[in-house]
Image (spheres, coloured by chain):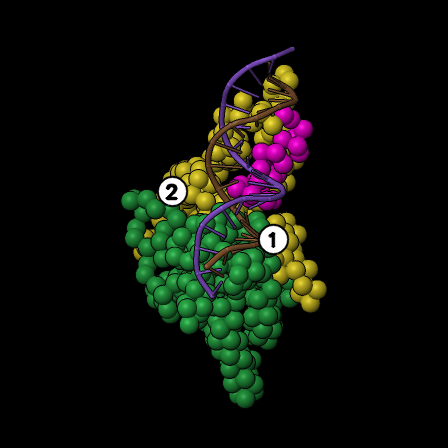
Chain colours: A yellow, B green, C purple, D brown
Amino acid sequence: MAQLDTKNRILNGAEQLFAREGFRNTSLRALTRLAEVNLAAVNYHFGSKDALLQAVIERRLLPLNEIRAKKIETVIEQARQRGTAPGADDLLRAFIEPTLEFRNSSPGADDFILLIGRSLSEPDATVRNCFLKLVLPAVHLLFAGLREALPQLSSAVLLTRLQFIIGTMSHVMSMGTLSPLNDPTFPQPLEQQALIDQLMKYALAGLEAPE
Amino acid sequence: MAQLDTKNRILNGAEQLFAREGFRNTSLRALTRLAEVNLAAVNYHFGSKDALLQAVIERRLLPLNEIRAKKIETVIEQARQRGTAPGADDLLRAFIEPTLEFRNSSPGADDFILLIGRSLSEPDATVRNCFLKLVLPAVHLLFAGLREALPQLSSAVLLTRLQFIIGTMSHVMSMGTLSPLNDPTFPQPLEQQALIDQLMKYALAGLEAPE
DNA sequence: GTCTATAGATTGATAGAC
DNA sequence: GTCTATCAATCTATAGAC
């Protein structure tokens, strides 16, 4: 029991520091101090700092992928039963909404969203690949659904637009609801649900623009 | 003359390594080895690693900002002479096109675009602020122009959408023309000009979507 | 301006006592 | 499982010869 406590305290501390300070910029000393565990505990429980990163990402991303996959598959399945193509808006929402709402799902989830929002533009290949490997299947599924929803778009253009959407999402995730342009002359940023609504409108309009 | 050569060799090497490996993950040893200068030369010519980063960013970003500012101001000025509001598409193009075309403007510029594409989601505040400080005036100018172009949008929504666009741009810049989803089952990514055209269409549609 | 040599601090990982 | 102590490798920065 003390074992599980230690493991989880390390995972929680790592999630926070990896997200806020970066993976390479987080020392095991700073981490074990925050988690209030012994320095040697990280290597005892996880083997290495790299393996710890993988555990941090998997702990949250595997469940999130389950949720997204189930929602997307439901949209596709229901369309199939109606004998129509799935709606691009329903597909997009099935991918975007659970991701951004995940931020408020439990303590520390906001740090996790920050971490994966930063992962795609991470220079360190260890971090980037660890995240990409786990997220690709979900993107494949979404791409396949959108292919049916928007048959008028060429595959190359659809993929490009999906990339744009992923870029927008990454940015929103790595910025929180905060403005990166934190300047008093700018208006206040939107809060969570309004932000999701705006992102949906924005992404859908861009996705459905004539080619 | 040997002095200028050393300074520029350091700047070029730093640009490449900071972009590809990350700022904190680039050691002065690796940098001076690549640039074929002495280890002590960095501190002699720039004072510190942080100051070198600032020099790397300023060298390219100040000229790029000049170009963007001039283009945006021209769009606004011409609209004023016509007695109409500036077009959102012209304003967007004045900001997006020079930025992405900058990649092919000179050797090493592709690394610079990668570097600033990654800057916004950089966990290290030194890097992020160094970039933000220089890019904010250009964003302010664009925002002011769009405010006139799209008076039907509230300030908060317009700012949010502008953030989305910046997120999309960051993503495109940090991915190059390559697919982050580099998987043989995906179609080939678009090349440069087609990518810019698609980004323009996508961003404009999202920006002009009904609120 | 360029170099060698090194100070001084920090890192990930581990050996071995308990 | 947890701890202390420490290794070996890294880092930025600088002093001082040339």
Q: Which mark is residue B149?
A: none
For label 1, the residue is: B125
**Residue identifier under label 2:** A140
C-alpha separation, residue under disc 1 versus residue under disc 2: 34 Å
Residue A113 lies left or right of residue D3; in this view the side is left
Q: State the residue in front, B64 or B57.
A: B57
Q: Amino acid type of disc 1?
A: Ala
Taking B75 as reference, is D14 above or below it? above
In the rendered structure, the residue with mark 1 lies on which chain? Answer: B
Decide: few, some or many residues near mark 2? Use Cα within 10 Å; few <14, some 14-19, many ≥20. Answer: some
- Magenta residues: mostly which secondary structure? helix
Please check whether the numbered discs 1 and 2 fall on a single chain.
Answer: no
Q: Element at badge 1? A: helix
Q: Is residue B31 shown above or below B97? A: above
Q: Say which amino acid is labelled 2.
A: His
Q: Is residue A207 magenta?
A: no
Q: Residue at x 35, y 49 (%)?
A: A147
Q: Nearer the viewer, residue A159 or A54?
A: A54
Percent position of residue B202, x then y: 44, 62
**Residue A209 visible in the snapshot:** no
Front residue of A179 and A188: A179
